[in-house]
Image: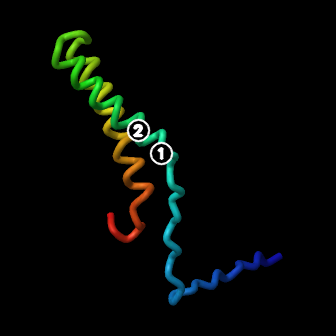
Amino acid sequence: MKKHKKKVRKIVDEKPKKRQIEALPGTFMLTGMFGFVITAIYTHSGRIPLDYGVAFCIVFLIMLLASLRSIMPSGKI
């Protein structure tokens, strides 16, 4: 018995589609902004330890950047 191999047809001219990113809610951006500012103030004043402050600032900054990325047109960034 012979095994038949299926030939795969590749389409060269077709361009991949750009992914659409849905906009995150405005509260997500507000949480990122306020969280970053409050954490930076609390860290600078010594109310929370430096390592926790830096970690929370990074998390809130990532949230803020993700929300900004979701409202930008896909070709701009």
Q: In the displayed structure, would residue 12 be above or below residue 48?
A: below
Task: Say which element carries label 1.
Answer: helix
Direction bottom: furthest residue: 13
Q: Percent position (x, y) of residue 42?
A: 24, 17
Query: Which residue in the protein does label 2 denote?
Result: 30
Q: Do the residues labelled 1 and 2 touch (CB within 8 Å)?
A: yes
Tell me the number on the disc at residue 26. 1
Which structural element holds mark 2? helix
Q: Residue at x 71, y 79 (%)?
A: 6
Above or below — where is 67 with respect to 18?
A: above
On the image, the x and y values in percent for residue 64 come to 36, 42
Closer to the camera, 9 or 59?
Answer: 59
Q: How dense is the environment of label 1, judged by Cα within 10 Å: few (below 14), some, or many (20 and up)?
A: few
Residue 31 shown left or right of residue 14 in the figure: left
Please give the label number shown on residue 62. none
Q: Where is residue 68 in the image (x, y as percent from the top left)?
A: 37, 52
In the foreground, 7 or 58: 58
Question: Quadrant of residue 45 in the image?
Answer: top left
Q: Residue furthest right?
A: 1
Image side of residue 46 versus residue 67, left or right: left
